[in-house]
Amino acid sequence: MTKPENAEVGDNDVDPWAPGGAMTNVPQSQPLSTHFKFKSAEETARSVSDPSQVRPKDRGPRNLGAAPNDAGGHRGRWLAGSALVMVLAIGAVLATADNGDSNTQDTSNTTRQTGSSTEAVDILPVVTAPRSTPPRLSMDATAGEFQVAGPAERLVLAAAPREFIIDLAPELATINPTEVVALGMSGLYEISLPSGRVRVTDVGFATSGARAVANDQVALVWPTPELRAQAISIDGVIAVPEPEVSAVSWSPSSDQMFLWTKQNNGAVATELSFRDLELRWQAANWLDPIEGVSPLIDLDGALLRQDTGGVYRVDSESTSLLTTGDVVSTGANHLLIRECDPTRSCVLLTVDRNGERRVWPTDLPPNIRPQLVGGLSPGGDALLFHRQRIAADVASHLGVLELADGTSESLRAPPSQELIAAWDTNGGGVVIVDSELIYIDRFTGAATIVAAGLPKLHSATTRRPAATPVCEILAISQPQFALMVAGGDMNTALPAATDVLGRLTAVLPAELVDSTTLLINFVTGFVTPEIANSQNIANWPGNVQAGLSALDTYAAKECPLIGR
């Protein structure tokens, strides 16, 4: 244990850094070339002692002010002991670091997984790499153990989501940051690519009959056992709006949702939105009851309603005619519209956020069913669809229609019409859930299993991650270092798991590699309960502590949402 300054060292108190001490014979670790960044020790210690600081609700890119000062005081203390032995210990770390080169170590341990072309997309690659096991959820219990929780109990379950790291297929290392939101047996899974971070929220009931949709701020699961909806915001706020829910109108382009309740005179709507760091819902009294609820919302959150003469935009202040035709699909940045002239010559056109219209030289092919919500690619130039079964020997399938030339490609034969597919955030590929979580390249047709070991998922949508890959992994690793700092001399906590730190090395910006390589080597090679006092950060070499300080500074500046 570290002694107070000026305290005498008794005969039975062996300095772990002195000759014969536990820290003098540290093993060598594998070289890692990467970079990291964390909050300061003072700030992380405060977050541990003050629960209100653990889960900040501001997920936006807000300025947190200047980075906290380096925790030089209590992290800079050293045990009295042999200076020579200390130099040797540090030298061992430096020697290990010097063995590395400029190439980042491949920490995924995955074999290459490439699917076939569009002619054989059903032959999927096999993943042989070991995977992290998702945490046990309430529905993972046996039938005799599990009982559906009431709303209050479910909110308690959902308030403590679990996070872990999975290895990704190497082909996805450069994917545009995309978060997949899907339902497991009883949990909402948020799987961020390319960080590999998975967050699981226990919804407290079997989801086999439920759906999930998500925009950039909130995910909604419905129906609950009480026929309501359960909302989960990106900063961990959980809510169960009051009304029963029979349908949901939503869009990947807007943070607005409408929850519909059936009544004798039609369905009435409740607005659900995320404003001022709060989930809010209120009756949409400005909407008259609707028969045949449309799921479509305009890019600015207005409801789209089909009526005599075309499709109208309806919000709390006004109603206006959007098109005399039909809204075929919505996307993150465009609406896809089909309009016909008096001779019934029809065209497809897209309308972007600025109202700019672009006419495409094609029409919808026969026998296809466009994916209404989120079916239009982020660039507005391609449409996801299901081609309906046209013969006993011709199965239905998922496809992409290229609006520029009218060509269509079959991506995969889905097991049912309930399959939901979603674009990645730049439109380069499609994520589907079909016994495995699969990514299909739009241009090559190559199918890649995202990560083996995940449970069977359904009802998948995609959105932009709320944080960068490095910040997402720091959100898992940093709390462990905070516990170690807070524990001081009596610390028994361990740092983040090796697979978490290994994944962190794969996503860190290059400028952080030099300052944090020593930290990662030291932690993965030396910090263990078997080496006395190694878990006390105050005992670590100065250059190792400097790496931790570098992570602290980076997280304080770049990761305002790290505590969610």
Image: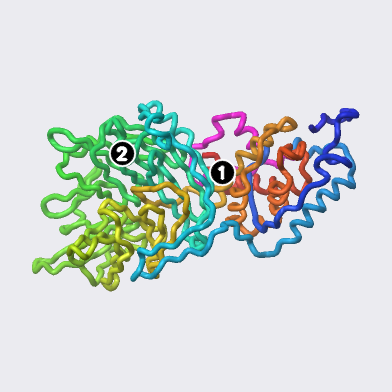
Question: Residue 155: x and y, percent?
Answer: 41, 30
- Image quarter where the N terminus lies is top right
The main secondary structure of the magenta stretch is loop
Question: Would you name the residue on which mark 2 appears?
Answer: 222
Q: Which residue appears at 69% of the width and 41% of the height?
A: 69
Percent position (x, y) of residue 491?
A: 70, 33
In magenta, the rendered stretch is 43-72
Image quadrant assignment for residue 142: top left
- Residue 475's mark? 1
- Residue 346 as seen in the image, left or right of residue 13: left
Task: Kindly tell me whether residue 102 is visible in this rendering.
Answer: yes
513 to the left or right of 285: right
Camera-side residue of 526 and 143: 143
Q: Where is residue 473 drawn, in percent x and y?
A: 56, 48
**Residue 256 colored magenta?**
no
Residue 259 vs 124, above or below: the answer is above
Q: Amino acid at mark 1?
A: Ala
